[in-house]
Amino acid sequence: MDQQTLELLRELTEAPGLPGHEEEVRKIVAKRIEGLAEVSHDRMGNILCKKTGDPAGPRVMLPGHMDEIGFVVNAITDEGYLRFTALGGWWDHVILAQRVTVHARKGAYVGIIGSKAPHVLTPEERQKFVKREEMFVDVGAKDKKDATKRLGIRPGDPVVPICPFAQMQNRKLLLGKAFDDRVGVAMFIDTLRKLAGAKHPNTVYGVGTVQEEVGCRGAETAADAVQPDVCLVMEVGVASDTPGFPKEDKEKGTLGKGPQICFLDGGMIPNLKLRDFLVDLAEEKKIPYQISMLTGGATDGRPIHIHGLGVPTVYIGVATRYIHSHAGILHSDDYDNAIRLIVEAVKRLDAKTVRTFYP
Ligand SMILES: [Zn+2]
């Protein structure tokens, strides 16, 4: 992975960007895409980055969602603690005792999701599963007035996980927050960077979408804005190489074994001809890949593949451990190989090839 991509991932993942609050990520995309593509926006907040190869060729959509899962303030207690509501799919086990930033009108405040010390827990409480409704954020406010008047905290304010980006002892392993889906955002930026000065028989739209984590809402209007003929969804995928996965699932998502071509997810059966076009291309170019199957969860592919008369769509993932928590781990080779595969695919997606995906 080159330094430019590392810095891009650091900048993108450390930015806050809850569903509906993607402004900072959008700014980073606009800055990084300068000179590589024509930028426009739709009214939902999606950012469209268009690079024309052959204006008569097909429109290739490469969406990556800008939002990340997090929380919003729901209510403020008399004592100044913040009750919250989740945006996106959280598992209550991973919420407790984590550092967060609360973004209010008057400033951003570090806080922690409060928990009881084990010393004061009864044996029954220790066995109990703490529900998110019982949790709260502590920003150190004196009381409700202090939180609302002095700090300017209001219901609806974003509460964003904190996890600084890091290269691990194995420099190819990257740790950070919001890989889901700043990885996808970085992927279309890097794809456009690699296509600079190259010939491609189509028009490419890298699209930073909004509000994926609350039901792929941005992708609906983005598909309308782009009117794609074919779509490659850029995402993270579930890694299956940690303890607790069945042995037979290892090959679906082992870090370092190649990008995942998703053969099924909870929201889309991919276009089979496009899927096999990617598989054959990976084999030909000797790009490692893994076949993933996801029973739960969907991507922006869900609304895009059923847009208009239908759009041949496949989801390409970078296997990531611990997604939908505060921090994830991925392997930089998987990212690089995903880019290789996507760039090769874009170079071949001419009108004739895209037509073969249709019945
Ligand atoms: Zn995602």
Image: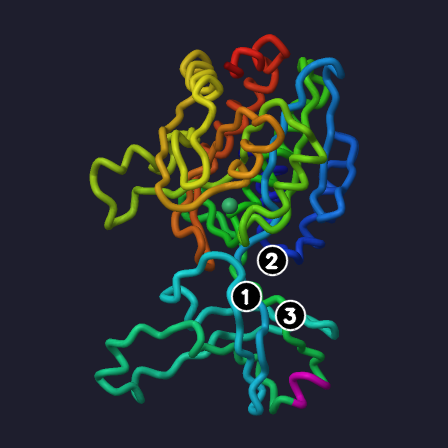
Above or below 117: residue 102: above
Q: Dominant secondary structure of the magenta stretch?
A: helix
Q: Amino acid at mark 3?
A: Asp
Residue lying at the far front in this picture: please name it. Answer: 309
Mark 3 touches mark 2? (CB < 8 Å): no
Q: Amino acid at mark 1?
A: Phe
| Boundaries of the magenta span | 145-149
| Dot 2 amino acid type | Leu
Secondary structure of residue under mark 1: strand
Instruction: Judge whether 78 appears above or below 35 on screen.
Output: below
Residue 32: % across, % down: 72, 40
Query: Label 1 belongs to which residue?
Result: 71
- On whether ligand 1 comes within 8 Å of the CB at mark 2, the answer is no
Image spot of residue 122 (x, y percent): 25, 87
* Mark 2, residue position: 18
The answer for how far apart the CA atoms under marks 1 and 3 are is 8 Å
Numbered circles on residues, count: 3
Whichever of labels 2 and 1 marks the residue nearer the N terminus, that label is 2
Check contact, mark 2 vs mark 1: CB within 8 A.
yes
* Image spot of residue 257 (x, y percent): 36, 31
How many residues crowd mark 2 within 10 Å: few (<14), some (14–19), many (20+)?
many
Question: Where 183 sits versus 176, above or below?
Answer: above
The residue tagged 3 is: 157
* Residue 146 lies within the magenta run: yes
Crowding near the residue tagged with mark 1, few <14, some 14–19, many ≥20 C-alpha atoms within 10 Å: many
| Residue 170 lies within the magenta run | no
